[in-house]
């Protein structure tokens, strides 16, 4: 149902988003606020600062030179210079001149090019969302949506691939910001700060930042680029050129299509459809280095949402593997993130979220993990959380979930005039589902700790140790058997592939009133480890003796 427009992407028109002629009209300086209640809304409260919309405004020389230089770099397809201007120069100018005010909106007196204007406006609105949230107005939100409509229409309705070269980082951040602003508007429309005029405008223009329009964009980019066909060919070790098509051969369309797959993972996760979220990546082998490795922020986002989807599908072993791989990658790439200060906050937050969810998974499904990751979890920040969760503290599970979960959205926004119902909020619904699952496993860590100490044990004795009724204990033992038998990925490209495996390090069976326990894990052979290390040291010693100083 989401692909109604994307089946005819060549006829992808602006009304594919706006669905009619009532839209935010464009005047000579950019997007006016004519669509807001007869044109007066923007002038009174939500409109642009007039000084940005006049060509008489003199922006600093360094800013003017940057804009012209960026246009020339894009026109000349100078990727190295585009990367330098976008990732280094632009953040620096923002810090120097626009820490507390907006970039100039209208730069037609510097560069009169429609495509560049649209790209520049995307940066303009992104800066407001990121740096000036207190100055973000209702018209900014609506005009940013209209600007995205224009940008994606230029890309999707062109009869041939448009002549545009951008860095992968920039393309990823366009898609990532598009989804973020959709998420922001979905939460904003439930805000009690909405006045009557804004409420009426949203009611009359329901297509603005709607779930359908966002999914329509992402699916259209995927189809236009033939990215799924290219990925299938790639992993079949065949040439992707035969299936890429005219648009798919263009790096612009190919990477936008690829990043749209990751964006769909994020959107479906926020909507609570975890199976579909992972399924959209069925042609991406997350167990090998692939396209997403070129953009670290994209890779971290992919791991975060796939890992969280695994948690909610009760595939804890796969979630632990996914989070561990992501955190090891972040450790290796930490120096690069620190060099790009504008990414630090996002990376640090997602890192903390993944460590928190990894701790939850290890409490529910204990297993060995990489020593460097385990040492972080043993720090006081996480060790106290783990200790409380192992003791059955449901409040700690709840706090960890609320901190680490995505920003949930409803696929069908509630009526604007309906009083808020906390019990119907998407976050509350997902939290309740998670806590119900945890509540069913609340005794399992305690049972596991006792089973490790014995080879046989009367049911009555175990019930006495745990201070619970024998009937309840029998239910918990059956729950232990069930919850420790999960789907685990073993081979295949799709992350949904897998087979049922027992994940507990101890197994047991009950014969009448006696529990018989067996250790299912083979102890590590430490001798082999030390022998390998001795051989490595000997090789190193021989190599050093050959060196001439």
Image (spheres, rainbow, N blue to C red):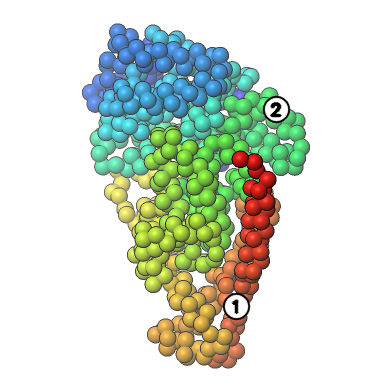
Q: Is residue 129 rendered to the left or right of residue 117?
A: left
Quote the CA–CA distance across marks 1 and 2. Answer: 55 Å
Q: Residue at x 44, y 17 (%)?
A: 117
Of residues 384 and 333, the one nearer the viewer is 333
Q: Pinpoint residue 52: horizontal percent, then vertical percent.
A: 30, 16
The numbered mark, 1 or 2, whose residue comes first in the sequence reads 2
Residue extending farthest front: 549
**Which circle, 1 or 2, is nearer the viewer?**
1
Can you tell which quarter of the image residue 243 is in? top right
Q: Pinpoint residue 192: horizontal percent, then vertical percent.
A: 26, 42
Can residue 469 be seen by looking at this rendering? no
Per the rendering, the mark at residue 519 is 1
Q: Which residue is mark 2?
A: 245
Circle 1/circle 2 CB separation < 8 Å: no
Q: Residue at x 64, y 60 (%)?
A: 534
Which element type, helix, strand or loop, lies under badge 1? strand
Q: Is residue 41 rendered to the left or right of residue 153?
A: left
């Amino acid at each position: 149902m989401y692909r109604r427009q994307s089946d005819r992407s060549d006829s992808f028109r602006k009304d594919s988003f706006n669905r009619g002629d009532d839209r935010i009209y464009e005047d000579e300086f950019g997007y006016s606020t004519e669509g807001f209640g007869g044109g007066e809304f923007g002038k009174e409260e939500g409109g642009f600062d007039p000084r940005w919309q006049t060509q008489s405004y003199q922006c600093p020389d360094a800013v003017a030179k940057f804009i012209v230089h960026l246009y020339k770099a894009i026109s000349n397809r100078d990727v190295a210079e585009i990367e330098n201007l976008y990732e280094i120069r632009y953040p620096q100018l923002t810090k120097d001149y626009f820490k507390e005010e907006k970039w100039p909106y209208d730069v037609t007196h510097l560069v009169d090019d429609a495509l560049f204007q649209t790209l520049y406006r995307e940066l303009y609105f992104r800066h407001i969302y990121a740096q000036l949230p207190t100055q973000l107005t209702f018209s900014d939100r609506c005009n940013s949506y209209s600007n995205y409509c224009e940008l994606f229409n230029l890309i999707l309705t062109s009869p041939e691939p448009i002549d545009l070269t951008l860095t992968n980082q920039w393309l990823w951040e366009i898609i990532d910001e598009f989804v973020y602003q959709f998420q922001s508007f979905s939460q904003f429309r439930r805000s009690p700060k909405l006045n009557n005029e804004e409420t009426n405008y949203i009611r009359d223009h329901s297509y603005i930042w709607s779930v359908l329009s966002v999914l329509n964009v992402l699916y259209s980019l995927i189809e236009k680029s033939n990215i799924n066909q290219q990925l299938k060919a790639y992993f079949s070790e065949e040439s992707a050129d035969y299936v890429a098509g005219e648009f798919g051969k263009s790096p612009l369309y190919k990477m936008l299509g690829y990043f749209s797959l990751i964006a769909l993972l994020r959107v479906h996760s926020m909507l609570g459809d975890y199976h579909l979220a992972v399924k959209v990546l069925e042609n991406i082998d997350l167990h090998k280095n692939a396209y997403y490795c070129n953009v670290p922020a994209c890779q971290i986002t992919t791991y975060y949402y796939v890992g969280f989807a695994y948690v909610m599908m009760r595939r804890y072993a796969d979630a632990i593997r996914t989070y561990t791989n992501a955190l090891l990658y972040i450790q290796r790439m930490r120096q690069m993130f620190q060099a790009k200060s504008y990414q630090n906050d996002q990376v640090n937050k997602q890192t903390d979220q993944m460590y928190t969810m990894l701790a939850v998974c290890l409490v529910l499904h204990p297993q060995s993990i990489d020593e460097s990751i385990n040492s972080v979890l043993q720090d006081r920040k996480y060790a106290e959380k783990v200790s409380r969760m192992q003791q059955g503290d449901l409040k700690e599970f709840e706090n960890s979930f609320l901190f680490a979960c995505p920003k949930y959205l409803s696929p069908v926004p509630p009526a604007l005039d309906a009083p808020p119902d906390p019990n119907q909020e998407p976050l509350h619904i997902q939290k309740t589902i998670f806590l119900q699952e945890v509540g069913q496993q609340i005794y399992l860590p305690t049972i596991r700790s006792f089973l490790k100490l014995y080879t046989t044990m009367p049911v009555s004795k175990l019930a006495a140790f745990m201070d619970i009724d024998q009937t309840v204990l029998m239910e918990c033992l059956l729950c232990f058997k069930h919850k420790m038998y999960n789907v685990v990925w073993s081979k295949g490209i799709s992350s949904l592939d897998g087979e049922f495996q027992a994940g507990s390090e101890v197994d047991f069976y009950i014969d009448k009133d006696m529990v018989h326990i067996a250790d299912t894990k083979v102890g590590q052979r430490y001798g082999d480890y030390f022998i390998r290390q001795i051989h490595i040291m000997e090789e190193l010693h021989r190599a050093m003796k050959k060196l001439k100083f």
